[in-house]
Image: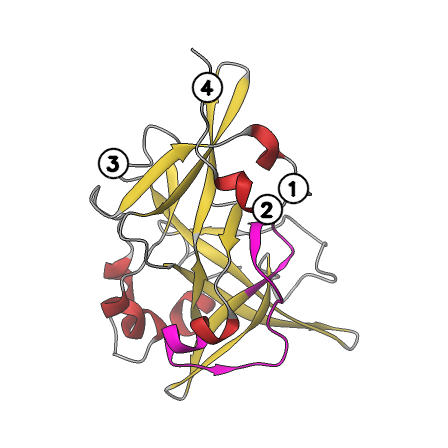
Amino acid sequence: MCGRIANTLPKDAMVRLFEATPGNDLPEGARHNLCPTEPLAVCISTGGVRHLQAMRWGFVPHWYKSPSDGPLLINARAETVAQKPAFRAAIRTQRCLIPADGFYEWHRAGESRLPWYISRRDGAPMVFGGVWQDWEQDGLQLRSCAIVTLAAGPVLAPIHHREPLILERADWAKWLGEAGHGAARLMVPRPESVLQAWRVGRAVNSSRAEGETLRAPLIEAG
């Protein structure tokens, strides 16, 4: 599962990262607590040309009569993404890259849910593999996305049973469909050497919370 994201990358840094043409609607400002239904910066490839644009986080299937007509689809499970009616067309032809600094996950300990922050050990931007789709009803148009998730690898498994698909730079062209077939083989968790995780304070539990202190390592008394 991936339900909260931090992304403080400036627009020009994301444009350089993906060698993409920027849209005029990219989200403004650094965000340390991006939540579902908010706009994300997303990279897609059309005819071999990469575009960076804003998309609603929460995939809207074509049969929804409104964006809130059914379940909020922020994640797509790798094991079933090719069979689920909502995603099976998008996973073939409309895959995307979603940049971030890192993401939050919650570990259940008895009655408590304890927040953790996960980032790359090398300090590089984290890039999620996702799927996207255009939706239109009664003149309302919306472009939306979901993040593909996998069974958790060695770093995430003690915290949560799922983790987002995190792609290395060498795999971006394959995921975007620029380098032929074989994207399914990329849907594997990152090795232990790639990711790091630490406990953070409960302030991030609120979707309204914002600021870099949300990611600060928690120092517990005793």
Determine contact: label 1, label 2, CB under 8 Å.
yes
* SS for dot 3: loop
Give me the C-alpha separation between circle 2 and circle 3: 29 Å
Residue at image mark 2: 211
Depth check, mark 2 against mark 3: the one in front is 2
Q: Residues within 10 Å of mark 1 (few under 14, many from 20)?
A: some
- Please name whichever residue, 73 or 117, is drawn nearer the observer in this view of the structure: 117
| Residue 28 relative to residue 182: left or right | right
Give me the C-alpha separation between circle 1 and circle 2: 7 Å
Q: Residues within 10 Å of mark 2 (few under 14, many from 20)?
A: few
Residue at image mark 1: 209
| Chain-order first, disc 2 or disc 4 | 2
- Residue 68 sits inside the magenta stretch: no
Give me the C-alpha separation between circle 4 and circle 3: 24 Å
User: Magenta region: which residues?
Assistant: 15-40
* SS for dot 2: loop
Q: Residues within 10 Å of mark 3 (few under 14, many from 20)?
A: few
| Residue 41 relative to residue 188: left or right | right
Residue at image mark 3: 154
* SS for dot 1: loop
- Which amino acid lies under the numbered mark 4 shown in the image of this protein? Glu
| Chain-order first, disc 4 or disc 3 | 3
- Residue at the outermost top position: 222
x, y percent for residue 68: 72, 54
- Please name whichever residue, 102 or 173, is drawn nearer the observer in this view of the structure: 102
The mark found on residue 59 in the picture is: none
Name which residue lies at 38% across and 33% down.
Answer: 198
